[in-house]
Amino acid sequence: MAERIDDQMLEYVSILAKIELKGEEKIQARSDMEKMLEYADKLNEIDTDGVEPLVQAIDMENVFREDVVTNSDDRENMLSNAPEKKDGQYMVPKTFN
């Protein structure tokens, strides 16, 4: 059977969760927490002997592909929209003296 949630446990959990519970909220939170513990107890009843643990639920495949260069060094085309250029390079304002 699930552990009973007392006031001290409820206060401790609310501090950890950084929430403030008042009145009816405390009653509802206690009820919800007890239901969660009851469910966990039900899960503990399941016979898992002979069941291999899963690292992940779906098969993984390598999705990487070979790096293939698809563009060439088209410097003139790349520099065609530059506001300023010099010796085949972009000119930018100085950032420090």
Image: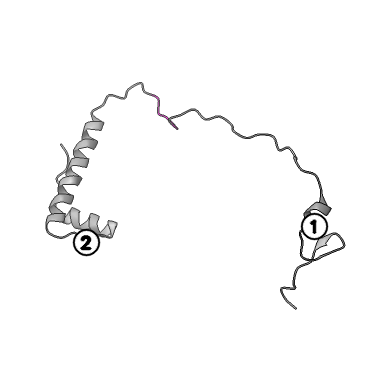
Where does label 2 land, which residue?
A: 20
**Which of the image's four quarters has the N terminus?**
top left
Q: Which mark is residue 56?
A: none
Q: Secondary structure at mark 1?
A: helix
What's drawn in magenta, residue-wise? 52-56
Looking at the image, residue 64 lies above or below residue 18:
above
Left or right: residue 52 versus residue 41 is right
> Looking at the image, can residue 5 be seen?
no
Q: Give whichever of 50, 76 is nearer the camera.
A: 76
Where does label 1 land, which residue?
A: 79
Q: Give whichever of 64, 73 is nearer the camera.
A: 73
Q: CA distance from mark 1 to mark 2?
A: 61 Å
Residue drawn at (20%, 46%), measured in percent from left and top?
Answer: 33
Residue drawn at (18%, 41%), measured in percent from left and top?
Answer: 35
Q: Main secondary structure of the magenta part?
A: loop
Kind of residue indicated by mark 2: Glu
Q: Secondary structure at mark 2?
A: loop
Residue 68 horizontal/vertical position (percent): 73, 37
Question: Could you say which quadrant of the image residue 76 lies in?
Answer: bottom right
Left or right: residue 43 versus residue 1 is right
Rendered image coloring scheme = one colour
Kind of residue indicated by mark 1: Leu
Residue 90 horizontal/vertical position (percent): 79, 62
